[in-house]
Amino acid sequence: MFEVKWSAAGTVKKALERYTRANVDRAVKGGVQRVKDDLRDYYDIKDAEEPNKFFRSGETDRRVHLWQQIKDSIDGPEVRYRSVRLSIRHVALQQKLHGGPIYPVRAKMLTIPIHGDAYARSAAEVESMFGKLFVIRMKDGRLFLAGKPNKRLTFYFRLSDGVDQKPWPGTWPGMRFAKESFRNGFRYTLNHSN
């Protein structure tokens, strides 16, 4: 969540005295609106440029557009006394930003795709397409979900109790980006208010 709290002091306060309180409040809201617009553009670019490992070429409808979903979850600006709030509601944002453990919720184990035919598909989908799947335990204890399409052993998924996801670089463009966007939107709105 991004929140701007502001108070005018010193020379800034003197410079703002020539504007009405309503114009300054409108400029604050305009600044946060600019942050929202710039963030939406930022996540559009990320969505277009970052490869998606769970995407099979030729099947664009199967791609998960995470950055698009994050962009669509941006709410605001919500004006409160002396502050304006812009929030991003997507549940995966904190996980992408800080990393952390991922555990299975509806199953006993996570199925991590390791074969091209398994990307963007559940184990049930793979089983319905290629036949019965079974668990193989390696000597070192690793578990895999495999099948025998065309009588040839194929490993589709690695099974795991959980994984520790690393923070994803570039999930948040940084406070410098947000402050600069806010400053530009604030100035523009203030200079164009009646």
Image: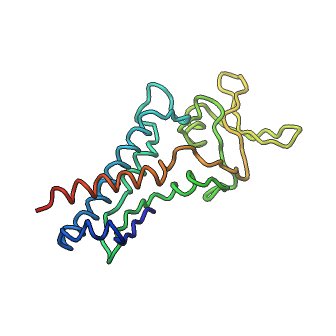
Q: Please identify the residue farthest to the left as the structure is shown.
A: 194
For residue 18, above or below residue 142:
below
Name which residue lies at 54% across and 36% down. Answer: 54
User: Foreground residue, 22 or 74?
Assistant: 22
Name which residue lies at 43% across and 49% down. Answer: 177
Q: Is residue 6 left or right of residue 15?
A: right
Q: Is residue 14 left or right of residue 114?
A: left
User: Foreground residue, 43 or 55?
Assistant: 43
User: Foreground residue, 140 or 42?
Assistant: 42
Q: Is residue 88 left or right of residue 136?
A: left
For residue 185, above or below residue 119:
below
Task: Tell me residue 35's x, y (percent).
Answer: 35, 54
Q: Please identify the residue farthest to the right as the structure is shown.
A: 139
Q: Quadrant of the N terminus?
A: bottom left
Colouring scheme applied when the structure was drawn? rainbow
User: Foreground residue, 53 or 2?
Assistant: 2
Task: Tell me residue 156's x, y (percent).
Answer: 66, 34
Task: Tell me residue 155's x, y (percent).
Answer: 70, 31
Name which residue lies at 47% across and 54% down. Answer: 175
Q: Quadrant of the C terminus?
A: bottom left
Total count of labels: 0
Name which residue lies at 37% across and 57% down. Answer: 74
For residue 155, above or below residue 177:
above
Task: Tell me residue 2's x, y (percent).
Answer: 43, 62
